[in-house]
Amino acid sequence: MKILILEDEDGKNDEIQYEIYQTIPDADIQREKNWYDYARAICNTKFDLIILDLLVPRSGKDGTVEDHHDQLVSTTRDYQSKSFFTPAIVLTRHTEDSGDFVYDLNAVDINVIPFNGHGEWKEALKLKLLAAQPKQKYEFVIICALDNEINAFNGLTDTWGSVKTISGLVCREVQIDMYKGVIVRAHRMGLVAAAVIATMALERFEPRLICMSGICGGIPGESGIYDLLVTQTCHQHDAGKWSNDGFRSEHYDVQVSVDVHNKLLEFCSDNGLKEFMLEGLNAGKSELPDEMEWLTCNVKADAPTSSGSAVMAEDGKTSSLTSGQRKLAGFDMEIYSVYEAARLAPNKPVFFAAKTVVDDGGKNKGDKFHRIGCLLSAKFIVKAIRAGIADVGIQPTQ
């Protein structure tokens, strides 16, 4: 948040800046001490909030202190100014005999607040700061349901931010090549949590790409441990109706767009992808399935998967999932919600998901394959972003 302060008194400036940093710790503050420098600053720079006093020197060379309220509207709301639409507040000790100028300023979103020792100005300033915060935008959002899925990205991205709350979401800011984004953690597993988080992220960050990374279950005969499933189409397997005849599923699916699917097929056909995925992954003996002598994985670029809110850990239960999709490759607890939220988003972002199979939904379900599974998925997501998956659908400039 970029803030301009016009204040010539050091003590008053220190008080104001202290209150700003209490509310916006990473605020970018520019201070000017005279009217000439202030007028030049708002003309050349776009600020998110302007805080000013009325009694300040004319310029750096002329220290004559004047009341500038007559010039305030014409200077601050000059049509040529880059800060023409920026909200502003006047923090002044001199509000007596103000006449109609307070009304005139309020009409152009410049609020006059008495600066006194009672402290009411602090709350007013806080409210203005919160209201003026610019919307944070990112080029991509990666959603994960588990900390292990998020931590797998550490060391793969070009930057790795600390955990912080941004617009009500628990995030890590990251940079991948030229793309700035966030990894968002769902507050719990399941379709409802994923739908809420995905919708909030799409609305508040307006990303060009939203995707999901992590681990999932596989359907025996269609996928095995450490297969990476890139979901081409997904449905909710626990939606439907219970009756005397049992459960009858209601089958609605969401597919990635044709352009995204083609890009993913092209990307997955790269002969070097599998080598990249396995590079640096040192699996211990306990992290390998009995039938696997050394770590390997298969990338399924157009996998049909399904999602449901309940954890599946019962032998033979996965056979019921295939009733609606003969070639179903895997299942998880979130992808359908992320896809549906993206499909309905006004800005129509690119969306896809890549999850690694770490169990078959049977009674022996455990977590010994989770570490490698999270890493495989994270490496695929990062490489896909570097390959420009977020730019699908953008017309090249002539």
Image: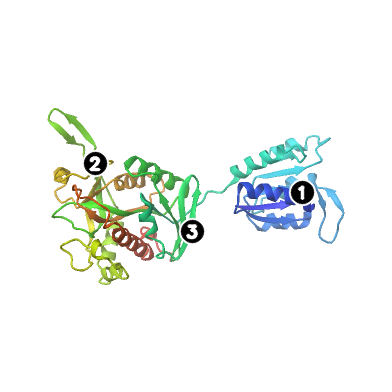
Q: In which quarter of the image is the C terminus?
A: bottom left
Q: Considering depth in this image, is 288 or 104 the residue closer to the camera?
A: 288
Q: Earlier in the sequence, mark 3 or mark 2?
A: 3
* Comparing labels 2 and 1, the label whose residue is closer to the camera: 1
- Crowd class of label 3 (few under 14; some 14 to 19; many from 20; radius 10 Å): few
Residue lying at the far top in this picture: please name it.
244
Q: Where residue 335 appears, x then y in whole percent?
A: 30, 48
Q: Distance between the residues labelled 2 and 1?
A: 61 Å
Q: Considering depth in this image, is 165 or 73 the residue closer to the camera?
A: 165
Which residue in the protein does label 3 denote? 161
Q: Where residue 47 appears, x then y in whole percent?
A: 63, 53
Tag 1, which secondary structure? helix
* Residue type at tag 1: Lys
Does residue 351 show up?
A: yes
Does residue 259 show up?
A: no
* Comparing labels 3 and 2, the label whose residue is closer to the camera: 3
Numbered tag placed on residue 12 in the rendering: 1
Q: Where residue 322 appears, x then y in whole percent?
A: 15, 46
- Mark 3 in CB contact with mark 1 (< 8 angstroms): no
Which residue in the protein does label 2 denote? 252
Residue lying at the far right in this picture: please name it.
64
* Residue type at tag 3: Gly
Q: How far apart are marks 3 and 1 (CA)?
A: 34 Å
Tag 2, which secondary structure? loop
Numbered tag placed on residue 220 in the rendering: none
Asked if 294 appears above or below 322 in the picture, the reply is below
